[in-house]
Amino acid sequence: MLQYPFDSVPEPGQVQEIVPGVLWLRMPLPLGLDHINLYLLEDHDGWWIIDTGIAIGPTHKLWEQIFDRHLGGKPVKAVVATHFHPDHTGMAGWLCEKWRVPFYMTRLEYLSGLSFSRMQREHYSWTSEQFLRRSGYSPQQLDTTRERFGGFGPYIEPMPMAYRRLVDGDALTINGNRWRVVVGGGHSPEHACLYCGALNILISGDQVIPKITPNVSVNGGEPEANPLKAWFNSHEHFLEALPADALVLPAHNAPFYGLHERLRFLIEHHEDHLLALEEACVTGSHTAMELLPVLFKRELDESQIELATGECISHLNYLHQRGQLERIVDEQGRYRYQSVDDTLSMRLRKHHHEAEIQPPLQV
Ligand SMILES: [Zn+2]
């Protein structure tokens, strides 16, 4: 069982102390998921901000409120983003501009953020269409997706034009404590977490969240990507590199104990998905779109279909690249997957389960 040591969550514009010098705050999100957790680390000469909130709604106003009431007269001295998604980087440009302070990120996340935030509708290309067609999108779905295509520019302030690079294994010294950078992958390309041994605290971003299963997705920009492999590797790395009893400060839900248990659950969760997909492809060949109900039991609306398809393809690419699924292109230009593994029925009997499968969330 995961343990949640805090009974309450910080109100908008308020902070909650985790330990002295480590503050938790929340910003609203206009998604199915209604909040992101951000953290403030106190240094002798100012505050470090970890993740920034999305640049729409009341976020600007709430930041001003935090500055007025909760910094104890110290300035902000640095901004860190764990990864490039807009709820994490949305306010980074504004914060760094306002305080004239450096911005910290891993290199791949910084470059991905620049790229996705500047993407426009006219960047929809034949490769974007081919990816969706191969996934099994209908002509009508292709039309609506083309209309909606674009990056997340509207949700973020222009990103800072310079950054300082975070590298796995490096450390930031904050108030005499070393916060080690621990990099994960799968949810985003080079996701930074920060671990402080002296406090035994891990700031985990979206890499480890207690209740939500982070989206692990393939998109048209890199159709043969294998993010699920990166995800499994990261989880193994985290199990080795981080203690089971660390207090985890995630970007969504609430701070918790039970890091190793959660990592193991997430590994099993995706292994269950892989097996369910292989099983579905024993009797015939299917497209990614046809396989969505195997992973997602509830009805998906249009905005969720894209993420769900991306997640489904991350599993299909993983199996295909391991030689467990065969992939052919049919007359309509769709990929169809079929199982080729003859040990499968035996493995299924051993492992049969009805795993509870969670819907994807855009985090
Ligand atoms: Zn994210």
Image (cartoon, rainbow, N blue to C red):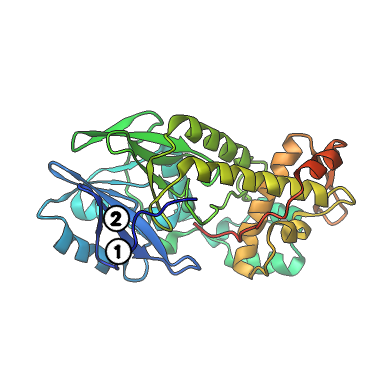
Q: Is residue 226 left or right of residue 38?
A: right
Q: Are marks 2 and 1 in contact (CB under 8 Å)?
A: yes
Q: Quadrant of residue 168?
A: top left
Q: Identify residue type, mark 2.
A: Trp
Q: Residues within 10 Å of mark 2 (few under 14, many from 20)?
A: many
Q: How many marks?
A: 2
* Spatial separation of the CA atoms under disc 2 and disc 1: 7 Å
Residue 24: assigned label: 2
> In the figure, 88 relative to 154: above or below?
above
User: Of label 2 and label 1, which has the lower sequence position?
Assistant: 1
Q: Is residue 313 left or right of residue 190?
A: right
Q: Residue at x 31, y 33 (%)?
A: 197
**SS at circle 2:** strand
**SS at circle 1:** loop
The answer to whether mark 2 is within 8 Å of ligand 1 is: no
Q: Is residue 197 left or right of residue 204?
A: left
Q: Quadrant of residue 308?
A: bottom right
Q: Where residue 177 appears, x then y in whole percent?
A: 23, 34
Q: Residue at x 63, y 60 (%)?
A: 306
Question: Residue 156 versus residue 322: which sits nearer the camera?
Answer: 322
Q: Residue at x 60, y 47 (%)?
A: 221
Residue 128 in view, yes or no: no
Q: Quadrant of residue 252?
A: bottom left
Q: Residue at x 30, y 59 (%)?
A: 25
Q: Where residue 153 appears, x then y in whole percent?
A: 44, 60
Residue 205 in view, yes or no: yes
Question: Residue 149 versus residue 173: which sits nearer the camera?
Answer: 173
Residue 342: assigned label: none
Question: Residue 235 versus residue 259: which sits nearer the camera?
Answer: 259
Q: Where residue 325 appears, x then y in whole percent?
A: 80, 41
Disc 1 designates what residue? 10
Q: Identify residue type, mark 1.
A: Pro
